[in-house]
């Protein structure tokens, strides 16, 4: 076996184990999916007061901080929290618009008690065309929004694409797996 084949098999195994789905697009898993898969998940936002990102305001991007019930300021350190509710990437292109393709999986409980399993429902690909300068939000699926920010570089555009889970945890901060998006993929193409 060549080193390339070993590498490809290793990458495939790690992808199935950490990102999923392990058992195909319509899999059933016996553990909660948020306990099964470690990466590629957009979790619901906390119902606690979180900093709100004002995307593309007149004066530029800014983080607005709010105070929680204990009057302590919640700062940027929460942006690297264990359960992210957004993802994004930036790229440069010289077209007049872009097309984003988004795919993910939702997991729904099947059965109850000790026999409960989680059934995956594949979603997408959704295709969203974004004209130059459009910001969003663009609704992908209930609870999932796509945002964009365009900046002129003089020789094209620097574009930032963000996917945001707008679902919320319950009042106790508990997360229902049904409100998370798993195995999230987003591709952008200049058109």
Image (spheres, rainbow, N blue to C red):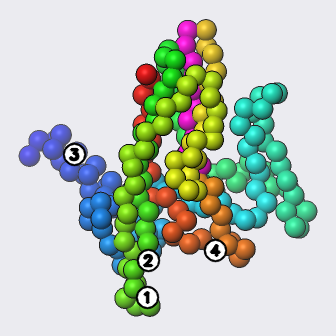
Q: Say which residue label 1 marks.
A: 112
Residue 92 is left or right of residue 134, and the answer is left
In what element is the residue under mark 1?
A: loop
Tell me which label, 3 or 2, sits earlier in the chain: 3
Q: Main secondary structure of the magenta part?
A: strand
- Distance Cα–Cα, label 2 vs label 4: 16 Å
Q: Is residue 34 positioned above or below 7 on the image?
A: below
Q: Quadrant of residue 186?
A: top left
Query: Do the residues under discs 1 and 3 have CB atoms within 8 angstroms?
Result: no
In what element is the residue under mark 2?
A: strand
Tell me which label, 4 or 1, sits earlier in the chain: 1
Task: Please tell me whether mark 3 or mark 4 is closer to you in this view.
Answer: 4
Task: Please tell me whether mark 1 or mark 3 is closer to you in this view.
Answer: 1
Q: Residues within 10 Å of mark 3 (few under 14, many from 20)?
A: few
Q: Say which residue label 2 marks.
A: 109
Query: Do the residues under discs 1 and 2 have CB atoms within 8 angstroms?
Result: yes
Q: Say which residue label 3 marks.
A: 8
Task: Please tell me whether mark 4 or mark 1 is closer to you in this view.
Answer: 1
Residue range of the region highlighted in magenta in the rendering: 155-164
- Distance Cα–Cα, label 4 vs label 1: 19 Å
Q: Is residue 116 positioned above or below 18 on the image?
A: below
Q: Say which residue label 4 marks.
A: 174
Q: Is residue 189 positioned above or below 74 on the image?
A: above
Q: Residue at x 82, y 45 (%)?
A: 64
Residue 85 lies, in percent from the top left, at 60, 54
């Amino acid at each position: 076996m060549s080193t390339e084949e070993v590498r490809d098999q290793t990458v495939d195994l790690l992808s199935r184990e950490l990102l999923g789905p392990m058992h195909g697009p319509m899999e059933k898993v016996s553990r909660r999916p948020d306990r099964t898969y470690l990466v590629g998940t957009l979790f619901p936002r906390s119902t606690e007061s979180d900093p709100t990102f004002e995307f593309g305001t007149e004066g530029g991007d800014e983080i607005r901080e709010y105070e929680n019930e204990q009057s302590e300021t919640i700062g940027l350190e929460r942006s690297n929290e264990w359960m992210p509710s957004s993802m994004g990437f930036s790229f440069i292109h010289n077209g007049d618009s872009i097309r984003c393709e988004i795919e993910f999986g939702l997991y729904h409980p099947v059965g109850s008690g000790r026999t409960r399993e989680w059934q995956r429902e594949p979603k997408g690909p959704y295709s969203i065309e974004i004209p130059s300068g459009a910001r969003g939000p663009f609704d992908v699926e209930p609870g999932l929004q796509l945002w964009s920010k365009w900046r002129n570089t003089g020789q094209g555009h620097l574009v930032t694409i963000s996917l945001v889970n707008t679902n919320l945890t319950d009042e106790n901060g508990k997360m229902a797996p049904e409100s998370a998006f798993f195995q999230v993929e987003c591709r952008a193409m200049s058109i």
